[in-house]
Image (cartoon, grey):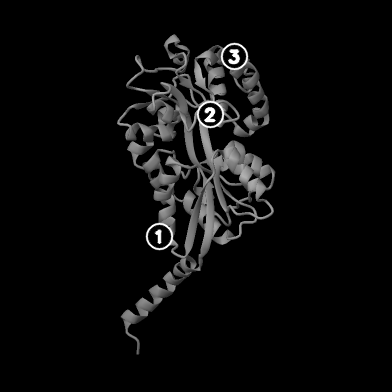
Amino acid sequence: MPTRRLILQTGLATIAMPAVLRAQSLSGQITLMSYTGIFQDNYTKAVIEPFLAANPGVKVNYAPGGTSAQMVGSVRAQKADPQIDVAIMDVTTSSIGNIEGLFEKLTPAEFPVLDELAPEARAAGGEFGPAVTFDHLVLVYDTQNLKPPLTKLADLWRPDLKGQIALSAPPNIQGLALTAMVEKMEGGDHRKSIDAAMKRLKELAPSVNTFEPNPDGYSLILNGVVKVATGWNARSQLYGDQSNGRIGTLLPPEGSVFQINTINLTAGSKNRVAAAAFVKHALSQPAQKAFTERMFYAPTNAKAQVDPKAVARTAAAPESRASMIPVDWNDILKVRDQWNNRWRREVISAAR
């Protein structure tokens, strides 16, 4: 006759079995495409490696995708025979992929984690892949060699910065965000016009060393090429730590703009079950907490219990949220080509 202990052990094993079987049933490999360099290194440690530990039968290949535009181009080229299963990119380009049918719609029935996300995270992708990180545009500068330091967006027009600025021009999302910020600085509203921004940016053009920072503005500062650049808060916080404070970060008092990266499940994924499991993991509370605390991207999962010291350095900090200019990236997508053409015609041409 079985003992009470054996009955209890059998019962517990039965309860645990579905979870064990689910983990064991995940097998094969998936390919995740996203940003290279510092993002890849930290995302691998904070998000991918815990997923692999929980799902030993799965292999995740990380495909460095370059810019978001290059990533959506890669997924588009593979539409008939997808090699990418999951893609993380900025919302302005993932929206293009959604329109073209490159990515799947995600439902709360299959992805219950969607109900844990902040409303703006769900709204970012609509019925498709939601926001997986929040960030915001900042000015980064050389604390050792720029005196006095930057204190506001208008400081970009200081005479001593001639030839010392790196800006990422449209269609790069940094250039789009900067346009909205300069328009706001001049008392305008980018939803109505960017004429004021174009006028001021044209005046700034002779001070710009490059409109295509390579590999990025942070590296150009550390290499002594420029003293100021546009950048993203999360990366600048990490580079600031790694450079012992040489990279300084300024959230302009005139206002900034949220940047959103979405996580997208490729239509026709060859290992959809494992790919979907990874998307769920990436949006989960533990993964969101880990990545925020490691690289200072604000979490999109509203239930993630993140260290307050880490939150204070992210786009989720109260002072950061209070400084954000309302930008609907779906609306920006509609005028992106127009803004891009105006930058080429009115701003970049003025630098020559």
Label 2 and label 1: CA atoms lie apart by 35 Å
Residue 105 position in % (x across, y down): 63, 50
Mark before the other along the chain sequence, 2 or 1: 1
- 128, above or below 163, in the image: below
Q: CA distance from mark 3 to mark 1?
A: 54 Å
For residue 121, side relative to residue 320 (left or right): right
User: Is residue 312 shown to the viewer in this render?
Assistant: no
Up-down relation of residue 2 to residue 124 (above or below) = below
Q: Secondary structure at mark 1?
A: helix
Secondary element at tag 3: helix
Q: Is 284 or 223 nearer to us in this picture?
A: 223
Q: Distance between the Cα atoms at labels 3 and 2?
A: 19 Å
Earlier-in-chain disc, 3 versus 2 = 2
Q: Is residue 321 depicted above or below 165 in this figure?
A: below
Front: mark 3 or 1: 3
Numbered circle sitting on residue 350:
3
Name the residue at 39% across, 47% down: 290
| Label of residue 53 in the image | 1
Q: What residue is at 37 percent from the left and 23 percent from the top?
A: 142
Q: In the rendering, at what x and y percent does residue 45 appear?
A: 39, 49
Q: Quadrant of the N terminus?
A: bottom left
Residue 235 to residue 46: above or below: above
- Residue 174's disc is 2
Amino acid type shown at disc 3 = Ala
The mark nearer the N terminus, 3 or 1, is 1
> Can residue 98 be seen by looking at this rendering?
yes
- Report x, y in % for residue 48: 44, 53
User: Of helix, strand and loop, which one carries label 2?
Assistant: helix
Residue at image coords 66%, 46%: 76
